[in-house]
Amino acid sequence: MKYDLIVVGAGVLGTFHAYHAARLGKNVLLLDKDQQQKGSSTQNFGQVVPSGLSSEWNKYGQRSLVHYLELQQKADFTIRQHGSVYIASDDAEQGLLEELREKHTEEGYESLMFSKKGIVERFPDLNPDYIKSGLFYPQELSVDPRQMVHRISDYLNETGMVHVRYNHKVVATIQKMVGCDVEIENGTTYESEQVIICCGYSFKTLYPAFFAESNIIISKLQMLKTKPLTNINLKSNILTGLTIRRYESFTECPSFEALETPDRYQELKEKGIHILFKQADDGSIIIGDSHEYAGINGLSELGCDSKPEIDDLIMKEARRILNLPEDCIAERWAGFYGQHEDDIFVHDVERNIKIITGIGGKGMTSSSGYAEASIRSLYQI
């Protein structure tokens, strides 16, 4: 069988490229090297928060919200519309919230500003001494990152929209006079008109020399997950003062350039730490995260294990915001993603073979909206 499109890599970016091509009636094959997806698409918070993105990427994030809700009507992909709230802890952070709300209002993106009293009433489990005010985005979503992409790809395969094959490690893509071939490690070859490579942070198999010159960097993040805490109800994605000082949407606000870093944040900022909370249906809470960076081959330099000293810093700040019981952590892990200075890395390595990767930490939020635009551009629609 000859396919219209083969997508290499079944993370959220690759899966949504396959999904949007299939929606256009294309015959699509989605390949992944592992038994099921892992890596960036399953190691993250599962927060879908366009509010944190730059103006350009916010548009992709808003389209992703639409796609997620459409998908959730067809099956349970763990998508929940509980909204997101940014909690300001001081005057400077509150000022940024007010500026972002004004900016998003002008752009037609809905938000609600809450006083300290309003946040305390809505989120009584948060420490009121931390809270100055909050900005709430009611349309934003959360997903279970360990299940969502698996469920979507399984759905695409079971409904026949996309042919999905796991344990298919692609070792070569070959441009031909017409179309191209994709060769699997076991020697199997598939034919296609087009190939898109969404390889996450796997850069050593396909085009390693090319990736070495790409200026992609690797980010390592540390996260923790609590035991089910049924006495706490966070309701929404919780993003805090350090997030306000970090996310791209706030860097576009007028007062950001004059923002000073208080002493209490200095060490946290050096480790790239900002505090997020996302509560799952069973009551467990994901807490994090930190950011360390290295070159494209820097996984060995960064190490795959969590560093206890970073976890301790995360938990110390987390407990300043949320009253967490002692000995509540059930899991600790490090996640990784590739990112690029141009927000995403896109390159035509051959006439019909395109690399799309390095989307950074915005993959869960914006991949679907971006992939929709990418596929429409590929087919000149």
Image (cartoon, helix red, strand yellow):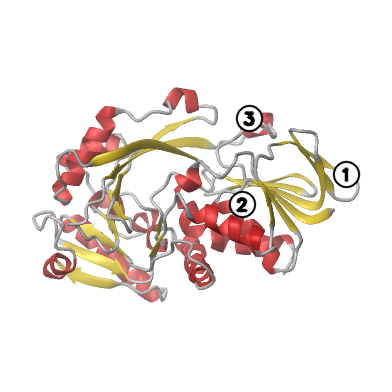
Q: Dot 3: what SS? A: loop
Check if mark 3's residue and mark 2's residue have beta carbons within 8 Å.
no
Tell me which label, 3 or 1, sits earlier in the chain.
1
Residue drawn at (38%, 58%) of the image: 52
Q: Residue furthest right?
A: 177
Any part of residue 360 in sight: no
Tell me which label, 3 or 2, sits earlier in the chain.
2
Q: Residue furthest top?
A: 301
- Above or below, 45 against 106 in this view is above
Any part of residue 14 in sight: yes
Alpha carbons under labels 3 and 2: distance apart: 18 Å
Dot label at residue 14: 2
Dot label at residue 204: 3
Amino acid on which the number 3 mark rests in the picture: Lys
Dot label at residue 176: 1
Tell me if mark 3 has few (under 14), some (14-19) or many (20+) residues whose alpha carbon lies within 10 angstroms of its own.
Answer: few
Asked whether, in this view, residue 118 is left or right of residue 17, the answer is left
Image quarter where the C terminus lies is bottom right
